[in-house]
Amino acid sequence: MEKIKLSEAEWKIMTMLWEKEHMTIMQLTAALKGETGWTKNTVITLLKRMEKKEAVAYEQGENAKKYYSLIKRDDVCVEETRSFLKRLYRGSLGMMVNSLIEQDAVSKEDIAELYDILKKAEEEQK
């Protein structure tokens, strides 16, 4: 998969399309209006950018274009996570977790969840 960088605004649209494929511009505008205040023109501009990036495409419906995602949420999330770790923590997951622990940003529940994730990963590698 070619790396596709999404802006914060593009993430909002992608999230909508991952939740409900084949949305029209009007449906996207209505769904995002409360959170963003975007007009139809803003949504159109963002969708055009995303088409150029090959993140979305559309099918011509009876009355309107129906947009859908061309990229998988999991693929984009993994790439964004790698990029984040590389930029902030020199690619080290351990350094990130340690930083969160030192800042008291990890709860007991988080620690228990991390143990479970690590146990599962260790078992899968055997």
Image: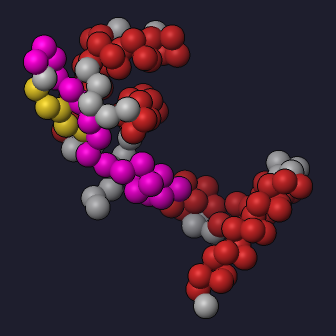
Residue 11: where, in percent of width, then height?
A: 43, 35
Q: Is residue 119 at least partly visible in the picture?
A: yes
Q: Quadrant of residue 32?
A: top left
Q: Is residue 10 at least partly visible in the picture?
A: no
Question: For residue 66: magenta?
Answer: yes
Residue at left offset 59%, top offset 65%: 90
Residue at left offset 48%, top offset 15%: 36
Residue 113: where, in percent of width, then height?
A: 77, 60
Residue 88: where, in percent of width, then height?
A: 61, 55
Q: Which quarter of the figure is the N terminus placed in?
A: bottom left
Q: Residue furthest bottom?
A: 126
Q: Please give the range of residues in magenta.
A: 62-81
Q: How is the image coloured?
A: secondary structure
Residue at left offset 48%, top offset 58%: 78
Q: Quadrant of residue 10?
A: top left
Would you say 111 lies left or right of 32 here? right
Question: For residue 105: magenta?
Answer: no
Q: Nearer the viewer, residue 92 or 110?
A: 110
